Amino acid sequence: MKRNIIVIGGNGQLGQCLSEVVSDKEQSFNYLFLSKKDLDFVNAADVAQLFEQHKPLYCINCAAYTAVDQAEEDSDFAFEINEFAVKRLAENCLRYKTILIHISTDYVFDGNLGIPLTEVMHTSPVNVYGLSKLKGEQQIQAEMTQYFIIRTSWMYSEKGNSFLKTMLKLAQSKNELNVIYDQVGTPTYAMDLAHIILHIVQNNLVNFGLYNYSNEGVASWYDFAKAIFEFAETDMKIIPVSSSAFLTRAKRPHYTVLDKTKIKEAFGVEIPYWRDSLNFCIQNL
């Protein structure tokens, strides 16, 4: 009898990518992809009932409050989803001996160091979203030991909404765009991250802990936008501007390039270069 794997946030960008990767490669588990309609993630009774019914071997949590600016005004709800619902999830995982794979963010850092960030470096979020995600990580680490927390950054894909989709949509009505050049990180193709998650499951990895994952290389949002229009063969003038040109409710970290040494050594994986993955994605669209 196949063991169950539940995917929370199954209709989000990463959840959809994981569903596609699973359908291509995975037959040895019974995957349940749960949308908001299927599961009220913040309802403790619903989550407990889900675990009692399915007794999953793995729980993959792709659900999160990700509206960075809105979180500044809606902080209670951001913490409810990103911290307290995650705490209850960890408690259920512990009760049913379920391995938790949880997705976190580069925004747990303040971005002031200017060097690639390792898993052991000091965290100091500069906005509510980053703090709520950090608190979620800490709740998992306090409750259980059999977990993989994967911090990622600047996620995009053919699915859902992302910076990639926004740029391509704006190109339909504009011929020039101002894009920030002084926030630096690495774009992450959600399909590549989905393959990493599947690698954990298929290989029954037990080197639990906190890991960084993004594509290889370094880019600013300006670099990212330039590459999008280059690969889409779209004639668009991109004007580099500083963060101060965009007044946002939430402050953003300036440098959040993630060091991937740990995940490459522990999992034995190679990570694609961000431009290669972006080109592949755009050709798929």
Image (cartoon, helix red, strand yellow):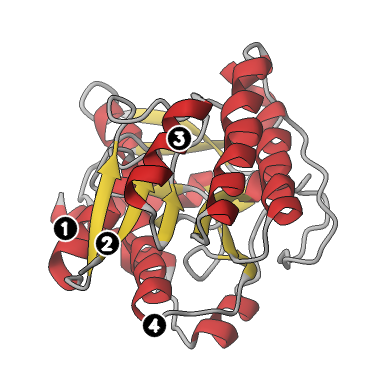
Specify the amino acid type for callout 4: Asn
Q: Position of residue 271 (x, y in %)?
A: 44, 76
Q: Which amino acid does label 2 sit on?
A: Asn
- How far across and how far down the image is residue 81, in percent? 56, 29
Q: Residue at x 60, y 73 (%)?
A: 260
Q: Do the residues labelled 1 and 4 touch (CB within 8 Å)?
A: no
Amino acid type of disc 3? Val
Q: Residues within 10 Å of mark 4 (few under 14, many from 20)?
A: few
Say if residue 122 shows up in the picture: yes
Cα distance, mark 1 to mark 4? 30 Å
Residue assigned mark 3: 47
State the residue position of label 4.
Answer: 203
Query: What crowding class fits label 1: few (fewer than 14 Cα within 10 Å), some (14-19), or many (20 or more)?
Result: few
Q: Marks 3 and 4, how far apart in space?
A: 27 Å
Camera-side residue of 165 and 90: 90
Secondary structure type for disc 3:
helix
Residue located at (34% from left, 69% from top): 198
Q: Do the residues labelled 3 and 4 touch (CB within 8 Å)?
A: no
Per the image, the residue denoted by label 2 is 279
Q: Earlier in the sequence, mark 1 or mark 4?
A: 4
Circles 3 and 2, Cβ within 8 Å, touching? The answer is: no
For marks 3 and 1 on the same chain, the one whose residue lies earlier in the sequence: 3
State the residue position of label 1.
Answer: 283
Dot 3 alpha-carbon crowd within 10 angstroms: few under 14, some 14 to 19, many 20 or more = some
Kindly report which numbered mark, 1 or 4, lies closer to the viewer in this rendering.
4
Marks 1 and 2 close (CB-CB < 8 Å): yes
Image marks 3 and 1: residues in contact by CB distance under 8 Å: no
The amino acid marked with disc number 1 is Gln
